[in-house]
Image (spheres, rainbow, N blue to C red):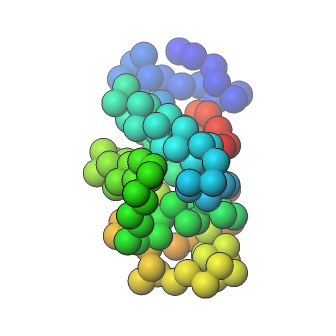
């Protein structure tokens, strides 16, 4: 047994670790969102369950139809996370403030509230914010 965040994690007994990754920055302006997605994908490859929560300008990561010409396509990384089993939620009020609605978002991304982020944190072994 490993004690993490005042919780007992039984991943040595067959349970799985769970991380919540909070992304607050927009794609392409900084590398933080790219690093967060790479971290999430690597964690998934290592058998760790991932919750991704996009908040503030991080909601732009889930915007459909991104096609950057001079940078990696972050939307493809996000799709890979979803296909690999990550649960991805996006802050609904943050989307609304930026003129995004559910139809603008990648399929599989769930419009959410702060309550959902609290639930993610409560069920996670570790939380990391980018």
In the foreground, 30 or 75: 30
In the image, taking residue 31 as reference, residue 70 lies left or right, namely left
Q: Furthest-front residue in view?
A: 70
Total labels: the figure holds 0
Does residue 112 appear to the left or right of 130 in the view shown? left
Q: Where is residue 16 in the image (x, y as percent from the top left)?
A: 42, 30
Q: As displayed, is residue 74 above or below residue 17?
A: below
Q: Residue 48: in sight, yes or no?
A: no
Q: Decide which of 10, 61 is in the foreground and name it.
A: 61
| Between 24 and 45, the one nearer to me in the picture | 24
- Check the image and report above or below for 124 versus 111: above
8 sits to left or right of 114: left
Quarter the C terminus occupies: top right
User: What is the quadrant of residue 99 in the picture?
Assistant: bottom right
Q: Residue at x 44, y 23 (%)?
A: 11
Residue at 40% across / 71% down in the picture?
64
Residue positioned 40% across, 57% down in the render: 69
Residue at 64% in and 38% down: 128
Report x, y in % for residue 10: 48, 23
Q: Where is residue 92 in the image (x, y as percent from the top left)?
A: 60, 75
Q: Using the image, determine if residue 97 lies above or below residue 42.
A: below
Q: Residue 36's x, y, as percent? A: 55, 41
Q: Is residue 40 visible?
A: yes
Q: In this view, does 107 lie to the left or right of 125?
A: left
């Amino acid at each position: 047994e490993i004690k993490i965040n005042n919780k007992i994690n039984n991943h040595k007994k067959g349970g799985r670790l769970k991380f919540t990754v909070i992304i607050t920055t927009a794609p392409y302006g900084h590398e933080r969102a790219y690093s967060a997605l790479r971290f999430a994908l690597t964690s998934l490859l290592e058998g760790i369950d991932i919750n991704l929560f996009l908040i503030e300008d991080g909601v732009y990561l889930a915007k459909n139809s991104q096609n950057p010409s001079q940078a990696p396509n972050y939307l493809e990384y996000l799709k890979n996370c979803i296909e690999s089993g990550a649960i991805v939620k996006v802050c609904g009020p943050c989307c609304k403030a930026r003129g995004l609605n559910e139809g603008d978002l990648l399929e599989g991304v769930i419009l959410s509230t702060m309550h959902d982020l609290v639930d993610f944190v409560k069920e996670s072994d570790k939380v990391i914010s980018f």
